[in-house]
Image (cartoon, rainbow, N blue to C red):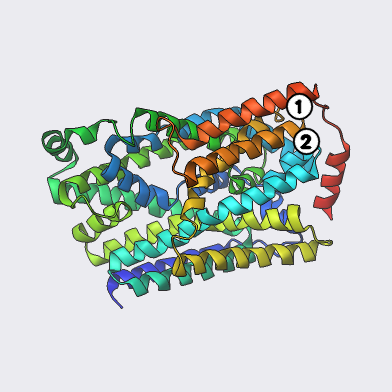
Amino acid sequence: MNVTLAVSLAGMVVIGVLGFLGRRGRSANLAEWTVGRRSFGTFTMWFLQAGESFTTFTFLAVAGLAFTGGASATYAIPYIPLAYLGLYFLGPKVWRLGKEHHYLTQADFFQERYGSPLLGRVVAVMGVVFLLPYLQLQITGLGLIVKLVTGDAASGVLSMVLATVLTVAFVLWSGIRGVASTAYLKDALMILAIFLVIAVVPVHFAGGVSAVFRRLQQTDPQSLFVHTGHYDHTWWLTSILISAIGSMFLTLPHLWPPLLSARDGGVVRRNNIFLPLYQLAIMLPIIIGYTGLLVLPRGTEDNAVLLTLTARALPDWAVGFVAVAAAASAMVPAAVMCMGMSTLVAHNLVRPKGPRTQLWVNHGTVIAAAGLALVLGIVRPDLLANLLLLTFSGLAQLAPGLAAVVGRRRLLSTGPALLGMLAGVAVVAWMTFFDVSIAHINAGIVGLVVNIALAALAQLLVGKPRQFGSSTTRALAAETAD
C-alpha cells in the first residue's frame, strides 16, 4: 500500500469516526433522527448548509469544465449567491411552516400546502428517483479520486466500499447530528486542500497564477471568454438561471432536513447572508482547469484534470491529504442524500405505523439506497448517467409549485400544479434523452416555461384555488408525532 492510498483510507476512517461521535443519545423517532429536535444554531447550520452545497463537483467538475469549456465554467460562481439572495426571504418562511406543521421532508410541504397526500407522494417519488443518480455520482466520484491519485483501479473500488460502509454506519447511528459533526471537518479540509493546490499547481507548471493567464492569452485566448459553440452565452446564462432557481426554491429534497433542523428562522436568515462567501472557493478550481490547458493534452478526461495536476506537483502525503478532502466532499453530501431519500420513503411513501417501525423502514432504505448506488457505481457507472442529467433540471420543475403556495394565499390548485410539474419533467426528459437542443437553452428552463404556462391555463379553467385548510395539517402533525 503506497503512502497516498494509506493517507486516503485513514482520512476516510477519521471522517467516519467523527460521524459516530456526533450522536447525542438514541433517537426516539424519525423526527429526532432527521431534524435533531430543530435545535441547531448558526455555527452548526453554517457547516450543514455549506456541506450539502460543496460536493465532488467543487473538486472535479468545475476544473474539468474550465478545461473543456473555458470561461463557461464561471456559471458556477454567481448562481449560489443569487439563490441565497432569494433564500434570505424564502428560507425563514419555509422553516416557520416546517416548525408549525411538523415537516420532515420536502414532500410534507407539498402535501400540507396543497392538502393533497397524492401530490406529496408524487413529489416523494420524484425526489427518490432523481436523487439516486446524484448519490451514485458522489460514490463514483470518490472512487475516481482515489484511482487517479494512486493510479490503481482496485484502490478506487476499495475506497468506494469503505467510504459507503462508513457513511451508512454513521448516518444510521447518529442521524443529522453525525452529518453535522463530519461537516465541520469536511469544510476545513476542503478549504485547506483547495488553497494548497492553488498555491502549488500554477507555480509548478506555469510560474504562478498570473503567468497562467498571460500564457493563455498568447496560446488560447478563446478560452478566456464565453464563446460560440455548445457552451455559449445562452448556455451560460440559462445554466446560471436554472441552477439559481433550483437552489433558491429548495427543489433538491436533501436540502430540507438541514434547513428544518435550525433553531429559528433568524439562524437561517443569517447564514444566507454569509454563505455566498464560499463561492470564492469555486474560482480556484477554475484556475486549475486553466492550468491544465497549458499542460495536459486536449483529450484528457475533464474530471481528471485537477487531481492529475495535483499528483504531478505535490508529494505523496500531500496528494493523500487532497484526496481525503475530496473524499469528505463526497461522503458528507452522500450522507445527507441518504437521509433525504430514506425519510421520503419512510415518512411519505411507506408510512408504517409506530415510531420504531418507521425508523426501521428508514434505516433499511438508507442501506438499500447506498448499496444500490455503490453496486451501480462499481458494475455499471454509466447506467444512471442520463437520469443524472435530469436531476437538476427535472427537480427544478417543483419550483413553480412551491412558489405558488409558500405565501399566505394559494395561487394554484393541486391539479394544475401537478399537471405543470409533470409536463415540465416530460419536456426535460424529451430534450435530454433525444438530445434536443433549442438554441442551447438549458432544458430545465424550457420545461419551466411549459410547466408555468400549462399550470396557469389549467387554473384559469378550474377557477380560483381553494385556500388553506387545517385538516391535512392536523393529519400531518399526528403522523409526525406518532
Left or right: residue 149 compared with residue 245: left
Q: Are marks 1 and 2 in contact (CB under 8 Å)?
A: yes
Residue at 63% x, 55% y: name it: 341
- Three-letter amino acid code of the residue under disc 1: Arg
Q: Quadrant of the C terminus?
A: bottom right
**Closer-to-camera residue (140/191):** 140
Relative to 439, residue 381 above or below:
below
Q: Quadrant of the N terminus?
A: bottom left
**Closer-to-camera residue (407/378):** 378
Residue at 53% x, 63% y: name it: 373
Q: Earlier in the sequence, mark 1 or mark 2?
A: 2
Whole-percent x and y of residue 313? Answer: 19, 57
Q: Which residue is mark 1?
A: 410
Residue found farthest to the bottom: 1
Quadrant housing residue 240: top left
Task: Answer yes or no: is residue 185 visible.
Answer: no
Task: Report helix, strand or loop for mark 1.
Answer: loop
Task: Report helix, strand or loop for mark 2.
Answer: helix
**Closer-to-camera residue (205/189):** 205
Crowding at label 1, few (<14), some or many (≥20) Cα neighbours within 10 Å? some
Quadrant housing residue 325: bottom left
Left or right: residue 322 compared with residue 140: left
Q: Which residue is mark 2?
A: 114
- Three-letter amino acid code of the residue under disc 2: Tyr
Whole-percent x and y of residue 28? Answer: 76, 61
Left or right: residue 71 compared with residue 433: left
* CA distance separating discs 1 and 2: 8 Å
